[in-house]
Structure formats: structure tokens, C-alpha cells
Amino acid sequence: MSARKLIAGNWKMNGLTASLEELRAMRDAVAGGHLSHVDLLICPPATLVAAAAQTVGDAFPVGGQDCHERQEGAFTGNISAAMLADAGATHVIVGHSERRTLHGETDDIVRAKAEAARAAGLTAVICIGETESERETGQTLDVLGRQLAGSVPDGATADTVIVAYEPVWAIGTGRTPTVDDVAEAHGFMRARLSERFGDAGRAMRLLYGGSVKPGNCATLLAVDNVDGALVGGASLKSADIVAICDGVRTLA
């Protein structure tokens, strides 16, 4: 796995053309060497992917937030992985809990989307995580094991798949698991991926997501097998992204 932490921003349904100013500020921070110790990825809404890719150039990659499992067809309103790649994306988030919960996406659908991403030359950021009730009833590792087995496609490598652990109850709530909880979850994921994929599983990046912010990022990213963070609201502003990256500078 890479020694450099990956800070991936998910803008969700936020961002208009004016938001490109924040991306310009992030681009300038990279150009100025302020983020040289981390890798940065920003996933804006689909309407901004092409403009975002043009704005940041080769400063850092841009990703999509979802893709359809088919490459083309009569699927009004959907976006294929090939379309994202054509717009300049290099990554795509699949299986985010909001997609699983609000759109009924199953592990099989998430796996198909990850396979479509690979076919289009994109790296899939596959999200998994337990609900609060599942955690309270001691099902966390069972849920993670089931989602890993069902959502990560055969033949996955560190170049085609990144796995993001996002406890559903921690997303946007300001609550985070304990360091021990994160260590247990990420250690479990690493073991399962290593068992299934060997060296490829040991090399895959594992991100933590769920209320990551400047004040807690260094603590979370210092945990074994945490190779970066998937950041929500705190990724909308360049100042917050720079603060998060500064927080993990001592870990580089």
C-alpha cells in the first residue's frame, strides 16, 4: 500500500459553477507544495466533473460520485462510468450508504458498478459500513464481511479498488467511532482482503469516512491500516481540506 495518505472529498449534492473557485484554491495549494505529503482526490457532482478536471489539470485527480452498472443504454438520468472517464474523471465512488439506503442498492449492484468502473479505466471507491442498530447488536464485522464479499469484484487490485469504511451512524452526525473501533474494523478489512486477494489485498488503500474534520483527522489516520480519509462536508472548502492535510503532515 502507498505510504502517502489519500484525502478524498465527496461533495455530494453540493456545488455550482462558482464552487470551481474552491478547486482553484486547492490546485494552487498543491502547486505551492502545501499538500505534497498527501494524495488528494475530489469528487464533485456530475455537472461539475468536466469543468473540475479542466480546472485542476494534473494537480490532483477528480472523481464521480456514482455510475450506472451498464456502459450505455436507455437509462434516463443515469451516468455511465465511460461518461465519467470521458469527462476527465479517474475515480468513482460506488456503494455509498446514501445510495444503498435511499436508492436500495445491494451488494450485487455495487459490485456491478465497480466492475463497470474497472472496464472504463476508473478506480472504484467502494463504500461499506454498518448502521447504528447493527453496531449496537454486535453485527459490525459480520456486516463488513458480507459487504466486502458481495461488493468487491473478483480480480480487484490496488489500482482498481479503494475501500472506504463509513459507519452509517457517523456520516454527517459529528460522531465518530473510537480509535479501537476503527482499528478493529480496518484490521478486519485488511485481513479479509488479504485472504481473498493476497498481495493485492494487502496493497489496497483503506479509507475511513464519517465526520472527518481538521480536529480529528490526525488521530483517525494514525490508526493501523487507515490509508486515508473519505471526507464529506469538510471537503467543500479549500481551507478545510488544507487544514485536514496539515493535520496528517506528521504521519507522512
Image (cartoon, rainbow, N blue to C red):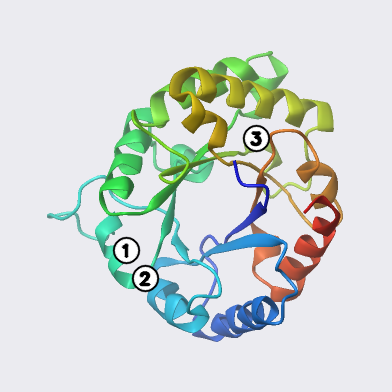
Structural crowding at the residue carrying mark 3, measured as other residues with C-alpha within 10 Å and reported as few (<14), some (14–19) or many (≥20): many
Q: Which amino acid, mark 3? A: Pro
Q: Are marks 2 and 1 in contact (CB under 8 Å)?
A: yes
Q: Which residue is found at the position 50% from the left and 28% from the top?
A: 199
Q: Is residue 1 above or below residue 213?
A: above
Q: Which amino acid, mark 1? A: Ala
Q: Is residue 153 above or below residue 41?
A: above
Task: Indicate the secondary structure of the residue bearing disc 1.
Answer: helix
Identify the residue under disc 1: 85
Identify the residue under disc 3: 167
Looking at the rendered structure, which numbered label has been put on residue 113?
none
Identify the residue under disc 2: 88
From the viewer's side, name the closer residue of 201 and 214: 201
Structural crowding at the residue carrying mark 1, measured as other residues with C-alpha within 10 Å and reported as few (<14), some (14–19) or many (≥20): many
Q: Nearer the viewer, mark 2 or mark 3?
A: 2
From the viewer's side, name the closer residue of 41 and 195: 195
Q: Which amino acid, mark 2? A: Gly
Residue 55 screen position, x and y as percent: 49, 83
Task: Indicate the secondary structure of the residue bearing disc 3.
Answer: loop
Q: Which quadrant does the C terminus fall into?
A: bottom right
Residue 221 screen position, x and y as percent: 76, 45
